[in-house]
Image: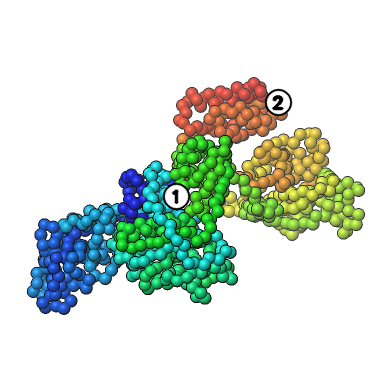
Amino acid sequence: MLLNTDTLRDFLEGSLPDVSTLCADLSYIGLEVESATPFNLPDLVVVGQILECTQHSDATKLHVCQVDIGSKVLQIVCGAGNVGVGQFVAVALIGAHLPDLSIQASNLRGVESLGMLCSAVELGLPKTNEGILILDSSINHDKPLRLGASLKDLPFFKGTLLDIALTPNRGDCLSVLGLAREISALYHLPLKSPPKLTIGASLDIQIASNLSPCALNYALLDLKPSMPLEIALNLALQHNLQSDPLANFLEYATYLSGVLLHAYPHVRLEVGINGAGFVCVGDHAQTLSVLGVSPPSLPTSAPYLIEASFIDPEHVCQSLHAHPMENSPTLTYRSKRGSNPQVLVGLEWLAFLLQRFAPQASLQVSPPSTPTLPTKTLNFSPQDIGDILGQTPSKERIQEILNALGFELCDQDDQFLATIPPFRHDISAIPDIAEEILRIQGLDDLPKSPLFIYESTGANPHYTRYLFEHQIAIKALAWGFKEVVHYLFAKKEQLEVLGYPTLQEDLDLFNPINSDLDTLRTSLIPGLLEALGRNKNLGFKSVALFELGSVYDTQRTEQPSLAFLATGLQTLPHYPHPKGLEWDFYSFTATLARILGVFELHPISPQQRQDQPYLNTTYHPYQSAWIFQEGVKIGVVGALNPILVQKHDLLEGFIAEVFSAHLNPKPHKIQEFSKLPTSFRDLTILVGKELHFSDLKKSIQQAQIPHLKEVFALDVYSQSPQEIALSLRLKIQSQESLVDSQLQEVVDRVLHILSTRFKARLK
């Protein structure tokens, strides 16, 4: 939508703010101004009047003109075909710089020329006609033009051309009247209205009774008006200028009012609906137009039957979708978005233009041809608005905003009954009302709060679990483990020998495949041990295996499990380790941590070993521990029992089994970190042999000593039959630089905990 701010003078009382403020405020209320372009006409271009116009003595297409510019009369040679005596013209004086040339005194075939009569294009304006630009008082607010006045200072050219981007639902703003309503509400400026029309006798028009929602009003115009420059320039700027003055008057009245206006010959019109649902206007059997889709052809002679029309935009869209037909893009652009249904307003603005530019013309308006369109209403309360906006406006503020936007409000105690303006086709629910209030009131005063959104995942949990376990398998492969797969079945006797539980008798297999697979496995470790034995028989001394599969408890409940086995060399011989590196307890658990994530080891109590025999028969009784992750026991790790290795002729190594149901994807956690260097303090303490490091570490962490980040065990060795010497490392770090006294305070607090709770003393 293009708007010359000078046009608003006919719609608003009072003065507007400066252009930059107006653009910012319009964009703020949802009418985004994409560009604001001043006309910037050249200097030294003035208003002149042609006093004489004679044929050039030596050129048939040139005229020698005497042009009065107020202070003097200039002789100017002009080649335009439309030049004539008495015309007001745009005169470029010597020294003027036009977009494509500079004006100098010249001699054209022996005749001196002291300037140039300019066309619209030569001034940087859109083309309005062939030849030079003929000026009139319409660009000077209907005041007589003053000779010698600078063209750039005329009111029309002092305006700014705004290019306003409109969303498809704001068809009401496809007119100057619609934009003026918004500006009126924004700045509390009263709206002007054209003079009311006198309604005359009805015209001979036949209207069908079954029409779809539409509004029609007709008038009789007895004279074709001439074309004022204001209308020509405004339409040319929007690329809607036509050659016929009547067509331009109707198009300009539509541009001003938003009402669709068309002209028919003065015949008896018939308005009805065809089989496709379109509203057609015709003369007997001939269809002249389709309402909102295709306009009539312009009549050739007066008098003219002028039609002001509106048709429901939803009906137009649905009909064209169901029955595509040739249409006028310019017309359907307005009708599909919703034109102004106040059709009489369109005729009032047409009469206003005729009164300004063609006072001799007569417009006889008939009564409305269709019933009044039904009004739409909405019931809402201020609390309804508050629930949407997060802040409840006062009743007075709601009334002020909506009344300014054209709504009619009826106050019903704690409710409002709002009558929606007929031109607001986009208002149908309470959130639309809230949006209108928000547009005018603004976002700045609303409380800022995060939007609560709950969205259930559409992911398949089984597939998500498969992907997680697949990632674990990929990590295990990356760290040198080979995956093995065994049957779900196992030999019951073998499980019992290794100390693993077996299924209850009444839940066991009644018809096993064979005697070696006569039950369901309760652990993955027996299968890995069999695989180790076969690899040893094949000559492999370094083996690293893992298996991911299902196991069963004594109640025959299936649960997932993950088991690892490693023997021999972790890395093959290479420099600087010519004999390679063997697996040990620490390297095995460190590799598991890289696969499973960080975990802790907790000791296995004697009672637990007694309750679960496999902890003594399969695992080394002195090199095994529970695996804990985030406070939850997830499995067991340890060395193979030497007795088992010797009895079954296996290789010494390490095994671990994890209840993989307790393993879950870890969400990413974001936490601050210090940019300052880390400080370390090492301590060696004497404690009882029965003390477990996990208990000591837990007590220190629970104390939440400031700046203490981690506690590590560095070394342990025997001090006496009852005591051990345990070396600890404290990691200390802060967001601020720490002095020695603060570091010592951390150490002292740790020592205090160790001495009071564990009777430890510093070595």
Residue at which label 1 appears = 30
The answer to whether one can see residue 547 in this image is: yes
Tag 1's secondary structure?
A: loop
Point 8% across, 74% down: residue = 110
Mark closer to the chain start, 1 or 2:
1
The image quadrant of residue 694 is top right
Q: Position of residue 500 (x, y in %)?
A: 82, 45
> What amino acid type is highlighted by mark number 2?
Gln
Residue at which label 2 appears = 722
Point 82% across, 41% down: residue = 613
Quarter containing the N terminus: bottom left
Asked if 750 appears above or below 447 in the picture, the reply is above
Of residues 747 and 169, the one nearer the viewer is 169
Asked if 111 appears above or below 533 in the picture, the reply is below
Q: Position of residue 191 (x, y in %)?
A: 39, 47
Quarter containing the C terminus: top right
**Alpha-carbon neighbours of circle 2 within 10 Å: few (<14), some, or many (≥20)?**
few
Asked if 516 appears above or below 28 in the picture, the reply is below
Query: Is label 1 or label 2 in front?
Result: 1
Of residues 363 and 491, the one nearer the viewer is 363
**Alpha-carbon neighbours of circle 1 within 10 Å: few (<14), some, or many (≥20)?**
some
